[in-house]
Amino acid sequence: MKRVALLTLLALALPLAAFADSIDTTNSGGTLTGSSAGLTLAGSELIAANGLNGLGLVTGDLGSVSFSTGALMAGGSLQMGGTFAAGGSFLITGNGTNGIPNGAIFSGTFSGPATWTLVTLANGTHNYTLSGAVNGTWYNGSAVFGATTQLTINTGRGFFNGTTSISSGDTNIVTSVPEPGTLGLLGTGLVGIAGAMHRKFKS
């Protein structure tokens, strides 16, 4: 019975160890401009980072976020939504405040198509979201990947006319992934539990 309890605890703990390490950043403001050539964000302030540089949640004026996408793909519309091609650039820059690195924190690009979505609210007004996967280089030189979602301010009952502001944006960067040995250990633990439970119920 003790062995079953021990293996059960092992099974509960190992999935936590298998999770990848990731950093969350939040930006706000800035001017988003767009045309068929793509979307560009400039002047957005980095206002929060969680887990960066071994720190917990840090808030304040921490730096900036800027990006550009690839071109608008066929069938899409700046007003009604669509998809922008992979490419462009994505840059998160720190200003050295409260332990945040000074300089480029993440420098990369959109690794796949970015989705531009029209959101119509119950009162008939509109927001837009841009979401897509990114990959690039972390401030320590390692190759990393992640995803970003950017929400525009409410555009009223009108539609995107080529320029607007960002209400808030969230970017999650995965800085490490589980080693194969960790996943193998998880599998071994689960097999052990199955065997122990089988013997227990058989007896």
Image (spheres, helix red, strand yellow):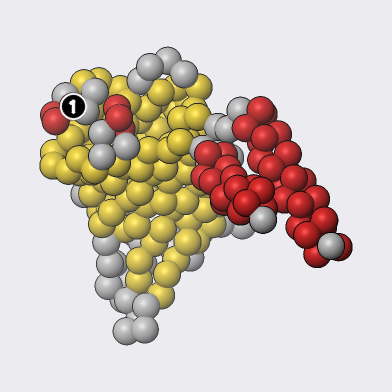
Pointer 1: what residue? 99
Q: Where on the picture, by quarter, is residue 167? A: bottom left
Any part of residue 197 in sight: yes
Give the position of the C terminus as an image quadrant.
Answer: bottom right
Q: Where on the picture, by quarter, is residue 49? A: top left
- Residue 185 vs 193, above or below: the answer is above
| Residue at figure coordinates x 50%, y 22% from the top left | 143
Residue type at mark 1 is: Gly
Any part of residue 8 in sight: no
> Camera-side residue: 2 or 44?
2
Give the position of the N terminus as an image quadrant.
Answer: bottom right
Q: Local crowd at mark 1 within 10 Å, few (<14), some, or many (≥20)?
A: some
Q: Label 1's element?
A: helix
Q: Is residue 1 left or right of residue 143?
A: right
> Camera-side residue: 117 or 27?
27
- Residue 158 vs 186, above or below: the answer is below
- Residue 177 vs 115, above or below: the answer is above
> Camera-side residue: 117 or 178?
178
| Residue at figure coordinates x 46%, y 36% from the top left | 21
Instruction: Looking at this view, name the residue that lies furthest to the right.
Output: 202
Q: Is residue 160 left or right of residue 44?
A: right
Q: Position of residue 154 (x, y in %)?
A: 28, 67
